[in-house]
Amino acid sequence: SFACLLVQSALGRGVISSLDEPVGDAYPAILDPADPRRATITVRHLLTFTSGLQEDGPQLTRDGLRHRQRIRDQAAHAAGRPLVHDPGSTFDYGSVHLWVLAGWYRARTGHDALDDLEAHVLDPIGFAHAGWIRDPAGNPATQANRSIAVDTVSPPIAIIVVPMKMNCTIGLW
């Protein structure tokens, strides 16, 4: 996924140090003193959809695709979702993890996730894009995009391989 590519790039550039760093160290919106398990959510948990946060597809995914979005800050909304499983224990596919990742990435690096993805991954291999989905607060939807196209200078197909130790998918576009 694009989120895995972003994080792999940041690791390679030394911008972040580990997939196992707790998200709450840089992004306190995820923390809740009433539930200390939230402090154990790591970047790896977000990338592997095992954060334990309750998915909210009708709000996070559908609202993100609306022309007039109702949720101003999807990352904060996602970070505030209830914890329904211990982090790392249960796979639950959904966008909640990747909205939190976008919020964490900005807090941790001071950079926009998709701006870094473009600059350090997509532009160097000749991928062009028509725009990214963002919420009204400017948080990027790292799980979705409006459209991606291969630049005419590039080969017609680009293969992006993310090391399997990250437990991310291999993408063929």
Image (spheres, rainbow, N blue to C red):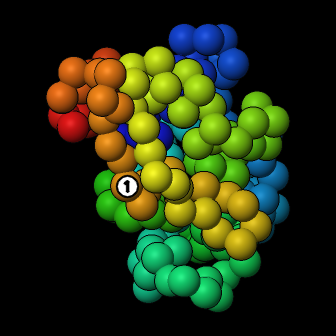
List x then y, in percent, for residue 135. 64, 69
Would residue 118 be visible to someone looking at this image?
A: yes
List x then y, in percent, for residue 142. 50, 51
* Total marks in image: 1
Residue drawn at the location 46% of the way across and 76% of the way down: 65
**Residue holding disc 1:** 147
- Asked whether, in this view, residue 169 is left or right of residue 21, the answer is left
List x then y, in percent, for residue 137. 76, 67
Is 10 situated above or below 33? above
Q: Secondary structure at mark 1?
A: loop
Is 135 situated above or below 11? below
Q: What residue occupies the far front of the structure in this picture? A: 152
Query: In this orientation, which residue lies closer to the viewer: 168 or 157?
Result: 157
Residue drawn at the location 81% of the way across and 36% of the way down: 110
Which amino acid, by three-letter code, is at mark 1? Ser
Q: Residues within 10 Å of mark 1 (few under 14, many from 20)?
A: few
Residue drawn at the location 59% of the way across and 48% of the way down: 101
Residue drawn at the location 78% of the way across and 59% of the way down: 29
Would residue 84 be visible to someone looking at this image?
A: no
- Asked whether, in this view, residue 59 is left or right of residue 106, the answer is left
